Image: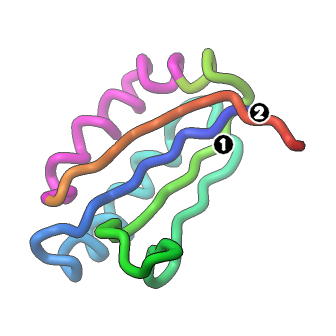
Amino acid sequence: MAELVVAYKTPIDPAAFDKYYAETHIALAKKMPGLKNYQISHGVVAGPGGPTGVHLVATLTFDSVAAIQAAFASPEGQATVADVPKFATGGADIMFFDARDV
């Protein structure tokens, strides 16, 4: 399995972010080919020392890093990436990697 993790930093208007993300962005991202599972954080994103400055974390599961790269290259993936600046006013870190259970 491979994971695509997006850490959305605190936006200028958290309520507007939440509304747009729920009503628009999730539907776009769910169209990405090869997507197996899609989870988002709920509530405060905290670390051992307290607040992190991250508003929301999305974790999308694919079969492989190659599948993530193919999803990004698809029209659906390109539309999803192009949508991020429309609501992620605090910025976003996008990471993907192969994962294994230990």
Question: Which residues make up the magenta segment?
Answer: 69-89
Asked if the residue at tag 1 contacts the one at tag 2, i.e. Cβ–Cβ closer than 8 Å, the answer is yes
**Is residue 23 among the parts visible in the rendering?**
no
> Is disc 1 placed on a helix, strand or loop?
strand
* Residue 17, disc: none
**Is residue 82 among the parts visible in the rendering?**
yes
Quadrant where the C terminus lies? top right
Mostly what secondary structure, the magenta segment?
helix
By what rule are the colours in the image chosen?
rainbow
Question: In the image, what residue occupies the spot 52% across and 48% down?
Answer: 30
Dividing the picture into quadrants, the one containing residue 38 is bottom right
Reply above or below: 18 against 61: below
- How packed is label 2: few (under 14 Cα within 10 Å), some, or many (20 or more)? some
Task: Please name the residue that numbered disc 2 is placed on.
Answer: 1
Question: In the image, what residue occupies the spot 49% across and 56% down?
Answer: 58
Q: Which residue lies furthest to the front in this view?
A: 49
Residue 7: x %, y % from top left = 39, 54
Would you say 11 lies left or right of 19 here?
Answer: left
* Residue 61, disc: 1
Foreground residue, 2 or 54?
54
Amino acid found under the numbered disc labelled 1:
Thr
Foreground residue, 18 or 11?
11
> Is disc 2 placed on a helix, strand or loop?
loop
Dividing the picture into quadrants, the one containing residue 49 is bottom left
Foreground residue, 35 or 61?
61
Question: In the image, what residue occupies the spot 46% across and 36% down?
Answer: 95
Amino acid found under the numbered disc labelled 2:
Met
N-term mark: 2 or 1: 2
Residue 87: x %, y % from top left = 18, 59
Would you say 99 lies left or right of 52 here?
Answer: right
